[in-house]
Amino acid sequence: MTAILYPVATSPERALDASLGAAVRESEARRLAGEPVAFVTGQVGPDFESREAALDAYPGWVDDERPVTRVQILPEHRFCQLVEAIPGRRPPPTISPVNRDGRRWPTPPHPPRTIWRLMVTYWRPASAAPGPVAEPVHPQARKARRSKAAEAAPETLNAMAHQPLRAIKPQQPLDIGLFEVRLPENPNLVMPDE
């Protein structure tokens, strides 16, 4: 089986037209980039209403099974794929059987509108990674509650409730399990207890 040669690039768009090279393994990609790399997948270009429109926009990047424009991509160049997605909402819930009026399944709902996107998998250098996440402006709710500060305004409380939770202190390493014991002759070694 042939391994896929993933491009080394700073963005998915650059992976299609101006990559630094191609690599199968992380060590090869790190050598090409001259720095640590991350294996990522990103979207390129606009959303398309049909698969045919996406295939017409990106000829030669993905397999095209249509008789007129048949294209077969080499196995080592299969780092692009077309993905169908439902824009802006979750997929419909699964349907359970009803067994009513001689029918096992209910009438299915109208299928949702879908879009097609070109996704590119590539090696991204560490220097091209998105910037760090901004620190929250407000303290965490539990920390503010413990500090017994003055009553906060409703807008402040709402902002505290919608920011991500962060640990107050770093998590400590896990202790030994319930059925494990440290050996008296070597306390660094943990053995299962019978």
Image (cartoon, rainbow, N blue to C red):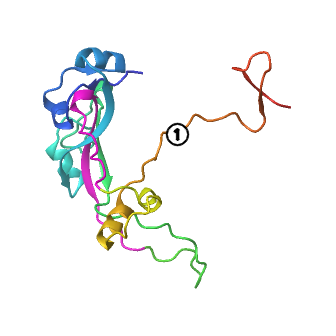
The 10 Å Cα crowd at callout 1, few under 14, some 14 to 19, many 20 or more, is few
Q: Residue at x 25, y 52 (%)?
A: 116
Vertical arrangement, residue 138 with respect to residue 108, above or below = above
Vertical arrangement, residue 159 with respect to residue 121, above or below = below
Q: Residue at x 44, y 73 (%)?
A: 108
Q: Which of the 4 image quadrants contains residue 115?
A: bottom left
Q: Which residue is mark 1?
A: 171
The quarter of the image holding the N terminus is top left
Q: Nearer the viewer, residue 58 or 187?
A: 187
* Residue 25 visible in the shown view: no
The quarter of the image holding the C terminus is top right
Q: Nearer the viewer, residue 163 or 41?
A: 163
Vertical arrangement, residue 99 with respect to residue 67, above or below = below
Locate residue 111, reporting x and y percent. Answer: 36, 68
* Residue 60 visible in the shown view: yes
Q: Residue at x 43, y 58 (%)?
A: 147
Locate residue 73, reporting x and y percent. Answer: 27, 31
Q: Nearer the viewer, residue 173 or 28?
A: 173
Classify residue 47 as left or right of residue 182. Answer: left
Locate residue 21, reporting x and y percent. Answer: 21, 20
Q: Which residues are magenta?
A: 109-137
Q: Is residue 131 magenta?
A: yes
- Label 1: which secondary element: loop
Classify residue 42 as left or right of residue 145. Answer: left
User: Which residue type carries mark 1?
Assistant: Gln
Q: Residue at x 18, y 21 (%)?
A: 20
